[in-house]
Amino acid sequence: MSGSALEVEGSGKTEEPVLKRAIAGDRVAFDQIILQYERRVLMTAWRLLGSKEDAQDAAQEVFLRLYRYLRHFDEKRPLLPWLYRMTVNVCHDLYRKRRQDDALAAEEVEGTPRSYDPQVEITRTEQRRLIEAAIKTLTEKERAAVVLRDIEGLTTKDVAGILGSSETTVRSQISMARVKIRKFVDRFEKRRL
Amino acid sequence: MSCVDFEKLIALEIEGDLPQPKAAKLQGHLRACRDCREFKGELLASQALLKSLAQEAVDEAVFEEVRERVREGIAADAKPPRLLAWRFALGAALVTAAIVAAVTLWRPRPPLHVAKASQPPARERLEAGVPQRGQEARATAGETPAARHPRFQTAKAKLVPRQRKPPASALAARGKPSEPLTVKLYTDDPEVVIYWVLD
């Protein structure tokens, strides 16, 4: 895929002066950066970790690392890829820590979303919960690839850059992930009938 | 290629991730395979759901909480590490206490004692044949010099070395108990001479 969405969005002319001021130590400019990117960071973390509380921890860590790293940051470089990369890394660390603390709930491994009543007709919200449960069944790398590619809407090239993988590897991961998600939903629907 | 292999290609094709030669091959298979056409339809539906997650509404309070925590984190970074300072202070106190305890409880070898200026100089006493303190002690009360040292007054019972009885044959041969070996140390202060009596 050509044309990096991140390069267009992450290094826009509007971002550069704010970033420059933030690098110079302007706290107001740093707050502006948080406001601009918090949704992307938090939602990505939420999808990768599967819980709001963990996502908040991850987002906090990402922005704190950005603050500490800011003086070394090249203002000409786009910020968004860096933020995504940091989000994936922080989530990876948190995910491993959480897995040590508490293994994935049996129902999630089995593939049934939490507190889901199969007798109840599937509404839109429930369908989303079903997809969320399906995402949890993916491997960590598949999840990162599909979240960035399909939910965040990045190109395969950008995803490869963020994950430090080749485009071929990312294509393989998103292909597997999409098929797994489809089959998970299919299995659930069959059980419901 | 089996249908399972084509499923992976379908998963790429639906989002435009499949390179052209493979895409053409897949189109040929889809025309012939009804199951794979159905699979493609189902996959498109689950992809639509997956993408809908991007539009999910999130309570503003969730973001505000993150912002607040970041602000607190930045403020904490700016403060000197008080906890670290306390740890250092505690560590230093513990080390000092350990040294004081070691010095207090350390027991030197018992026979050490110091001759003070109130008595005649040690050399004169020796030359005049005056019995040394250790000898006096043994002769009179059976007390060791160490036991009389002010430092050991409180723990006398522990510090008195066990008196070993020489064998009767040895006593008979010598006629009297053997004299202890005395080491005399002269210090810079002419008034202070240190005797080390070895049993």
Image (cartoon, rainbow, N blue to C red):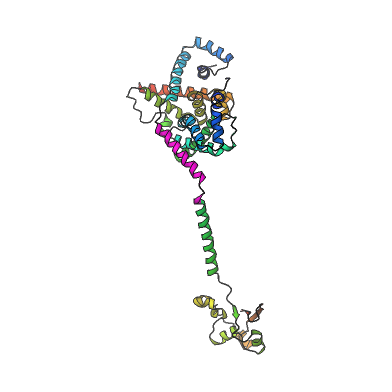
Q: Position of residue A60 (x, y in %)?
A: 48, 37
Image quadrant where residue B127 sits:
bottom right
Judged by its main secondary structure, the magenta piece is helix
The residue located at (60%, 83%) in the rendering is B117
Q: Residue furthest bottom?
A: B128
As drawn, is A111 to the left or to the right of A6?
Answer: left
Q: Which residues are magenta?
A: B58-83
Dividing the picture into quadrants, the one containing residue B144 is bottom right
Image height of B40 relative to B107, above or below: above
Along the line of sight, the residue nearer the viewer: A40 or A148: A40
Picture coordinates of residue B61, whole percent (x, y):
40, 34
Identify the image quadrant of residue A191: top left
Q: Position of residue B31 (x, y in %)?
A: 50, 9
Give above or below for B175 relative to A81: below
A70 is within the stretch colored magenta: no
Q: Position of residue A162 (x, y in %)?
A: 56, 29
* Quadrant where the C terminus of chain B is found in the figure: bottom right
Query: How many numbered marks, from 0 up?
Result: 0
Q: Residue at x 47, y 16 (%)?
A: B40
Extreme residue in the left direction? A119
Residue A166 seen in the figure: yes
Is residue A53 something that shows in the picture? Answer: no
Most foreground residue, B166 or A39: A39
Quick check: is B71 in the magenta stretch?
yes
Q: Is residue B100 above or below residue A175?
A: below
Q: Quadrant of the N terminus of chain B?
A: top right
Q: Residue at x 49, y 44 (%)?
A: B76
A179 or B54: nearer the viewer: B54
